[in-house]
Amino acid sequence: MRNTVPLTVLANLRAGMPVKDPHFGWWTSGGEVRGAVFHTPPHPVGLFAVPVEAVSPLIEALDGDLPELVGPVEVTSEAVRLLGEPSRVVSERLYRLERLTVPDVPGRGRLAVPGDFPLLVSWYHAFGAEVGMGEADVAEQVARRLSGRELFLWEDEGAPVSLAALSPACGGVCRIGPVYTPPSRRRRGYGAAVTAYAARTGLAEHCEQVVLFTDLANPTSNSVYRSIGYRPVCDYAHLTYAG
């Protein structure tokens, strides 16, 4: 569960996901590999599998050039100690689904289909703008996830009202994200409904565990996910040093 992001990135790369100028590294101790780091632009440097003692030599090896990074709080705290205060910090929490509680919300869930492509691209753009972490090529990502049957919609009165994505299983774990509901459709339970639908599909067809990340600055989403059965695993931080 704790390595859900690097495992998913690795699986996507092996499946042919295009990425420009990636970097990969590892940390050895006692003659064994004990940590890994990766950078697949435009995403931040991933320190998910890096021990705290590897942070200092990593920063030295990169000449302090870590404009954006993400990892467990004990690792990112060490980065802050060495690099100074970042210009932006997004605090995140990893949740694991314990027992799914399906909310009573009008409508139904369904798998997204090619005809949904324009809507999905617009929602992905809106989500990226809202959280400040947009993708470089949204259309390519949406097309790839559509073909992989990874995108789900909640419909009410015949119209899509919310989106949830489900990553392929890696190590028996699927990850929900992103989840997006247009502002005009919020506070009606659609986000919880589509998240529950995607999780239920994942558990039935793909994986043994379902996880997701939340922004701790958003108490509403954290409360919603808890209400349908998600429980905290550990905390992470996304640090930005570039302007």
Image: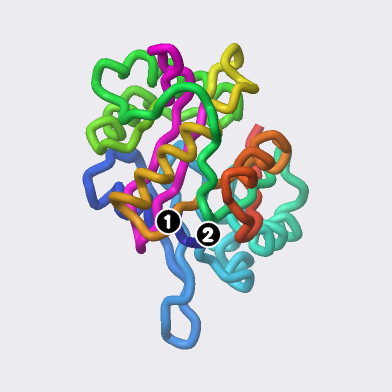
Q: Position of residue 25 (x, y in %)?
A: 42, 62
Answer few, some or many: residues within 10 Å of disc 2's Cα (few below 14, many 20 plus, some between 14 and 19): many
Q: Nearer the viewer, residue 84 or 13?
A: 13
The C terminus: image quadrant: top right
Up the image or down, 57 lies above or below 114; here it is: below
Q: Quadrant of residue 16?
A: top left
Q: Which residues are magenta?
A: 154-180
220 part of magenta stretch: no
- Whether residue 24 is visible here, answered yes or no, is no
Labels 1 and 2 touching (C-beta < 8 A):
yes
Residue 75 at what x, y percent from top left?
A: 64, 62
Secondary element at image label 1: helix
Q: Residue at x 42, y 86 (%)?
A: 31
In this image, 74 relative to 46: left or right?
Answer: right
204, 13: nearer the viewer? 204
Q: Which residue is mark 2?
A: 48
What is the basis of the colouring in this image? rainbow
The residue depicted at 51 percent of the width and 40 percent of the height is: 102
Query: Does dot 2 land on a helix, a strand or a loop?
Result: strand
Q: Is residue 41 above or below residue 128?
A: below
